[in-house]
Amino acid sequence: MAEFSGRTAVVLGGSRGIGLASARQLAGRGAHVTLCGVDQPSVQDAVAGISGPVDGAVLDIRDAAAVRDMVATAAARTGQIDILVCSAGIQRYGTVADTAESVWDEVLEVNLKGTYLACGAAIPVMPRGGSVIVVASVQGIATQQRVAAYTASKAGLLGLTRAMAVDHAAAGIRVNAVCPGSVDTPMLRESAALFTDAAHDVEQVLGQWGKSHPVGRIASADEVASVICFLAGDGASFMTGAEVKVDGGLLAGLAVALPE
């Protein structure tokens, strides 16, 4: 029997990147997956590319009523949601001095409020053994320059993960976060495109970013999704409130060069 056979999974941000890889792996291991994305074409393409039981939903994660309706529809088949992957997110650049209030609100609403809304709707229909996996970031722990809103949202997700883990442990529901480093996703490529010039194309920028990780490269979305599936499964039954770094050693080192 497949690992997640008979279980219902919802993947936010499931039409691309880490969310899509997670939806694909969960379905491949037997879960009935509802993947959510922001537009119909990407959702249709994602569903068409997955072998296994999968439904698609176009969703604005900031819309509380829409989130509740999506969760109710996904849960209708079995009466419950067994696995929730919160992978919807956006990145914007700026310091607090030059980030417009509208941009700040957008980032916090998508990255942090969206997870709050989804968990608030899904946890009441989760059984004992249910699992929530929040896709945070290494930038919730440390930060690069000029990502104030993004870093704040990801740090908020780690705090929210701990709060939910404590609040719902007695009900047998586990809540964990993954903190990826640089991952080859459409979002990272869109960010890399902002830093191209005559001498550096997107692949070269990604290569430079990869060199900042001790393993010497960026991750694939599937590598992060494999950790998400582990956290969703019974092998992680004693893990809750954890912040699992999937960062190629990025946060293990100090930027101190020894003299030659």
Image (cartoon, helix red, strand yellow):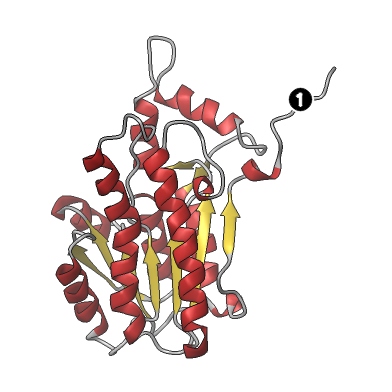
Q: Using the rendered image of the protein, determine whether residue 32 is visible from the camera's viewpoint.
A: yes
* Picture layout, residue 56 above or below residue 174: above
Indicate whether 104 appears above or below 133.
above
The residue depicted at 63 percent of the width and 34 percent of the height is 216
Q: Residue 93 location in percent, x, y?
A: 36, 33
Name the residue furthest top. 198
Q: Is residue 131 left or right of residue 49?
A: right
Q: Nearer the viewer, residue 44 or 191?
A: 191
Question: Residue at (32%, 46%) from the top-left corner?
Answer: 90
What's under tag 1, amino acid-wise?
A: Ala
Judge whether 154 appears above or below 57 on screen.
above
Q: Quickly name the residue at label 1.
A: 257
* Residue 45 rendering spot, x and y as whole percentages: 22, 53
Is 42 on the left or on the right of 218, as rendered?
Answer: left
Residue 5, position as x, y percentages in the image = 42, 82
SS under mark 1:
loop
Decide which of 49, 13 is in the foreground and name it.
13
Q: Which x, y percent locates residue 132?
A: 44, 72
- Would residue 100 be found to the left or right of residue 23 on screen? left
Image quarter (top left, top right, bottom left or bottom right) of the C terminus: top right
Label 1 environment density (alpha carbons within 10 Å; few <14, some 14–19, many ≥20): few
Q: Residue at x 38, y 9 (%)?
A: 198
- Above or below, comparing residue 164 to residue 47 in the picture: below
Q: Quadrant of residue 250?
A: top right
Q: Specify the farthest residue to the front.
A: 97
Q: Quadrant of residue 200?
A: top left
Q: Residue at x 30, y 60 (%)?
A: 113
